Image (cartoon, rainbow, N blue to C red):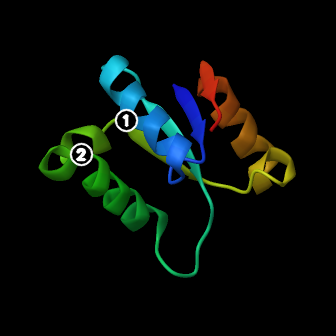
Amino acid sequence: MILITGAPGFLGRQILSRLLAAEETSTLCLVVRRSAVAAPVERLKQLFRELFGEGAAKYLTRIQLVEGDLEQEHFGMGSAAFRQLASKITSISPS
């Protein structure tokens, strides 16, 4: 599983779209900030519609969302949840 930070940003969008195309069997883990405006899943669906148009749905199955804050230790997650996530990550692609 490849961990990606900053997916909604310009660089993150580029990295995300290229990894989805190049790593056809990999699962991508996106760390997303909590938001009072829209749920992370809805923000992800919107991002994928912008990136892939009508073909967006086929990519959503390869994504795991993790709500977190990169400025906090363990992304603001509990130690056990962070260790479980870390055990699945094989690569990190910061943006």
Q: Position of residue 77 (x, y in %)?
A: 75, 53
- In the displayed structure, 69 sits above or below 26; it is below
Task: Name the residue carrying label 1.
Answer: 17
Query: Left or right: where does residue 90 sit relative to residue 77?
Result: left
Q: Which quarter shows the C terminus? A: top right
* Circles 1, 2 touching at the beta carbon (< 8 Å): yes
Q: How far apart are marks 1 and 2 (CA)?
A: 8 Å
Q: Which of 46 and 83 is in front in this view?
A: 46
What's the mark number on residue 85?
none
Residue depicted at x 51% and y 81%: 37
Q: Which of 62 and 48 is in front in this view?
A: 48
Q: What residue type is labelled 1?
A: Ser
Q: What residue type is labelled 2?
A: Phe
Q: Can residue 77 be seen in this view?
A: no
Circle 1 — which element?
helix
In this view, the residue farthest toward the bottom is 37
> Label 1: how many residues lie within 10 Å, few (<14), some (14-19) or many (20+)?
some
Q: Quadrant of residue 81?
A: top right
Task: Name the residue carrying label 2.
Answer: 52
Could you tell which of marks 1 and 2 lies nearer the N-terminus? 1
Query: Left or right: where does residue 71 sit relative to residue 58?
Result: right
Q: Position of residue 40 (x, y in %)?
A: 48, 63
Residue depicted at x 31% and y 25%: 21
- In the displayed structure, 20 sits above or below 91; it is below
In this view, the residue farthest toward the front is 10
Residue depicted at x 51% and y 25%: 1
Residue depicted at x 58% and y 81%: 36
